[in-house]
Amino acid sequence: MSDKPVFDRPSADPSEQEEGTRLRPRFDDAGLVTAVVTDHASGELLMVAHMNEQALEATLSTGVAHYWSRSRNALWKKGETSGALQSVREVRVDCDQDAVWLKVAVAKREDTCHTSRTSCFYRLVADDGQNLTFGDRRNQPAAS
């Protein structure tokens, strides 16, 4: 395997980084970029995760979403054990290339979240006048 980096390094020239035509991910000090993941058909926000260079490269080369698990400190092929594989339909980067947006099709949509929901964003924050609570719980897990 080559020691050559897969991606071009970020440019010190903001114009090149923000307007250029080369993918130059700006990984943070921990070597990660934020990944926002939505359903390619509905646009629903499914999850937010992180990618290191290896995860981004695996995602782009295989067409299946890979992430970096900060809790396990390991590469994570989303859905490998649950069957909820994420087939990547489109990849975008933000203006300064420190975040990616994946539009995916999920093989087993009810298991996108590890809580057996279609989205990790199932709680709506509400203020009952005394406390901040979760007023609306969408996408309840399937009955076991």
Image (cartoon, helix red, strand yellow):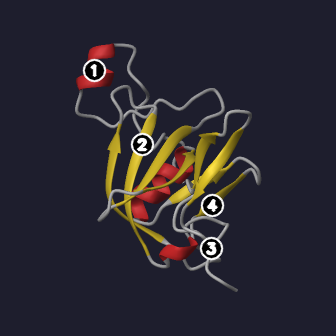
- Name which residue type carries label 2: Val
Mark sitting earlier along the chain (2/4): 4
Crowd band around label 3 with a 10 angstrom C-alpha radius: few (<14), some (14–19), many (20+): some
Label 2 and label 4: CA atoms lie apart by 16 Å
Residue position marked by numbered label 2 in the rendering: 100
Label 1 and label 4: CA atoms lie apart by 31 Å
The disc at residue 114 is none
The disc at residue 141 is 3
The label nearer to you, 4 versus 3, is 3
Residue position marked by numbered label 4 in the rendering: 76
- Reply above or below: 113 against 95: below
- Name which residue type carries label 3: Pro
Measured as percent of width and height from the top left, residue 119 is found at 53, 61
Q: Which residue appears farthest toward the right when viewing the image?
A: 72
Q: For the residues labelled 1 and 2, say whether their Cβ atoms are less than 8 Å apart.
A: no
Label 1 and label 2: CA atoms lie apart by 18 Å
